[in-house]
Image (tube, helix red, strand yellow):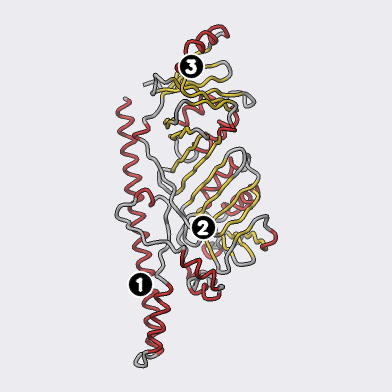
Amino acid sequence: MAIYSYTEYTPYQKQKKEAKNNNNIEIKLKIKTKTLKDILEIQKLTYGEIILEIKQDGVEIKNVDPSHVYMVKQKIPNSVFEEYNIDKEINIGLNVEKTLELIKNSDKKGYIVILKNSDNDKEITLLCDGFKYNINLLNVEDMFKPKIPQLDLPIVFSIDTKTFYNFLDKTNKITDHCFIKSYSDKLILNSGEVYNDDNTMITLEYDKNDLEFFNTKNNIHKVFFSTEIIFNLMKKLKTIYEKMLIYFNTDNPIKFVFTGEYETMILLAPKIFDYDDDPDMKNIENSEEDAPEEIIENNNSNEPEKEDISDNSDKEDFSEKTEYSDDNDISEDKEDNIKNEDIKPENQEIEKNDSFDKKIELKTKILETKKLLLELQFELLELEKKERIEDDQ
């Protein structure tokens, strides 16, 4: 089945054809060719099929890679378009690679007009450089619709996109991962020397006042993540945006936000870090004891609830959260033990160690279960993709 077709019209034919179809047009969008190319090239790096959510205030795209390790969301406000006329809000499925093939040699300084007729839900029309392309739409009902999880990411800082790209570029030459660690007064980006055979390190360190924006907490936070994925995306993003914001929390997905003419957001699953390899993070739960009382209360109130992992496919994509026991319950237990004269201090220490080992065991089981669910979701997506190909044939 043909994916697309194109026709070149004379000016008179174009005028006559447009006049005939104008009454049936329910969507007409006009956008700069370069802008559309940039958007689609970013999406292509994630997955070759997207859903365009065309709304009154603009277009949204949410895309997840096949292994469900990261998500890319883009929000293109209607102000980006030279023309933005829609009769109703609609979702359309688009083959990114085929569309890019059609417009890759188009004039970057020109414009592309996107048309959809109300009497045809199976295709859209692109007008570009005098050519008309009819592109078959994908069936939205058969496509995966990702949802963005609710996350508590209190640490936020800004950085130049080229600086962050250069850090990733240098890091990739010696390892495939890195970490970001925040203190109350500074921020560190590091290539992760603990896992590096020759102990080569690449480090960026900023005092709080050196950063244009830095929202931190008194206790230490650290996120550990793969560099390959974000590095590949940054190759394109650094040519579009000058600044970026990075949001993170210990053992949570890391969020990268790029704001300009339109917004791009990337949500990347973390690598789970072994705290025994980092003295600063070994007693991360106890570090709250040194924080002011109001921060302790705030952290407890925002503590993530325990999830039912038996049926939460929408949230499993990125919620690599570490679950903690209630610190207040631990404190009450310790007080009861101190009051009980029959319990010796060494027994208290043994109980504390047992509790810590139990939490580590539970965390490991949760992560293993989530990994299995992600693998099953990926297999399901592959099966659905094969079925669509067979149906088309």
Give the position of the N terminus as an image quadrant: top left
Q: In the rendered image of this protein, does residue 82 appear above or below residue 192?
A: above
| Mark 1 crowd level (few <14, some 14–19, many ≥20, 10 Å Cα) | few
Q: Tell which of 13 and 187 is nearer to you.
A: 13
Q: Secondary structure at mark 3?
A: strand
Q: Earlier in the sequence, mark 1 or mark 2?
A: 2
CB under 8 Å between discs 2 and 3: no
Q: Earlier in the sequence, mark 1 or mark 3?
A: 3
| Mark 3 crowd level (few <14, some 14–19, many ≥20, 10 Å Cα) | some
Residue with the mark numbered 1: 358
x, y (%) of residue 276?
A: 48, 71
What residue is drawn where x is 45% and y is 34%? 53
Q: Secondary structure at mark 2?
A: loop
Give the position of the C terminus as an image quadrant: top left
x, y (%) of residue 129?
A: 58, 18
Q: In the rendered image of this protein, does residue 342 appear above or below residue 122?
A: below
What amino acid is at disc 2?
Leu
Q: Earlier in the sequence, mark 2 or mark 3?
A: 3
